[in-house]
Amino acid sequence: MSQTNNQWNTELYENKHDFVWKYGSDLIEILAPKQGEKILDLGCGTGQLTNQIAATGAETIGIDNSGEMVEKALKNYPNLKFILADATNFNFAEQFDAVFSNAALHWIKPPEEAIKCIYRALKPEGRFVAEFGGKGNVEQISKAISEAIAAEKYASEPTINPWYFPSIGEYSTLLEKAGFEVNYATLFERLTPLKGGEAGMRNWIAMFAGSIIDRIREEYYPEIMVKIETKLKANLFKNDLWFADYKRIRIVAKKKNY
Ligand code: BEZ
């Protein structure tokens, strides 16, 4: 089991999906943290990027709504602060110079509530720097999964889309409505190689689409995986390597007092 009802297999996450924070390193360059700044890492996972930010001399707090992730982050970096918190409902007594978030906001609904909390957490003119799945993210994978389980017999319950992949227009509008000035917004493709050779796609699905796939009756699981892989092979399997058709949104915004 992996990502189901907010329960994460942190070992699988760290061993097979380390690209999640490796790609996040260039987002830290955009954040450009400075010595002594207070920075909140929203959706910190197992803490690798929080640690990289802290290494610049910034004071960090990492938050995540998975107990397993927070526990592992504390084990990985015992000198840093990590707190279990819901991104749509958190409140700190202190305010931050920046809120940073990598590969987390596509899990968080409703986005308006998260944006409200981020706004409140920032000092005036504080910056919000985020990257997550944008419009069209994992479109081929999602389509293959839904087509493969479309037949009634496979699923014990209707599937629910667990993700939020907005366009830059949609997300910028939400930020502006909340009082942010949007300084930078982009949407770009990032075909992402998956570890595990032949098993790469099923590992990704188990890790990240658990809440969809767990609705499939167990006896059909192997059959469905083969169906999904067959649909995706021509486009997403090259030289013994699976790829995920990621599309990322990157946003930089500043808290204003309109
Ligand atoms: C992403 O990082 O884009 C992503 C991760 C898991 C599920 C869907 C998207």
Image: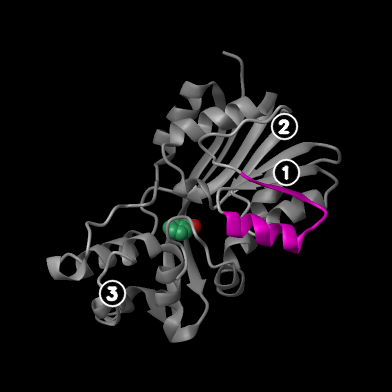
Determine the residue positioned at 61% across, 25% down. Answer: 120
- For disc 1, the neighbor class at 10 Å (few under 14, some 14 to 19, many from 20) is many
Residue wearing tag 3: 228
Residue 203 on the magenta segment: no
- Magenta-colored span: 67-84
Q: Position of residue 89 (x, y in %)?
A: 53, 34
**Image-based side of 244 in relation to 100, left or right:** left
Specify whether residue 239 is in view. no
Instruction: Give SS at disc 1.
Output: strand
Q: Label 3 crowding class (10 Å Cα cut-off): few <14, some 14-19, many 20+?
A: many
In space, the residues marked 2 and 3 are separated at their CA atoms by 44 Å
| Residue type (three-letter) at the residue carrying disc 2 | Phe
Q: Check disc 3 and report its element: helix, strand or loop.
A: helix
Image height check: is 24 above or below 178?
below
Please report the residue visible at 25 percent of the width from the left and 80 percent of the height from the top. 219
Disc assigned to residue 61: 1
Q: CA distance from mark 1 to mark 3?
A: 39 Å
Do residues under tags 1 and 3 come within 8 Å of each other at their CB atoms? no
Seen from the viewer's position, the closer of residues 25 and 162 is 162
Give percent across and percent down for residue 190. 48, 61
Q: Residue furthest top?
A: 258
Residue behind mark 2: 96
Q: Nearer the viewer, residue 224 or 176?
A: 224
Residue type at the position of mark 1:
Ile
Q: Separation of disc 2 and disc 1 at Cα?
A: 10 Å
Tell me whether circle 2 and circle 3 mark residues in contact (CB < 8 Å).
no
Q: Earlier in the sequence, mark 2 or mark 1?
A: 1
Q: Is mark 2 within 8 Å of ligand 1?
A: no
Do the numbered discs 2 and 1 sit on residues whose CB atoms are within 8 Å? yes
Identify the mark nearer the N-term, 2 or 3.
2
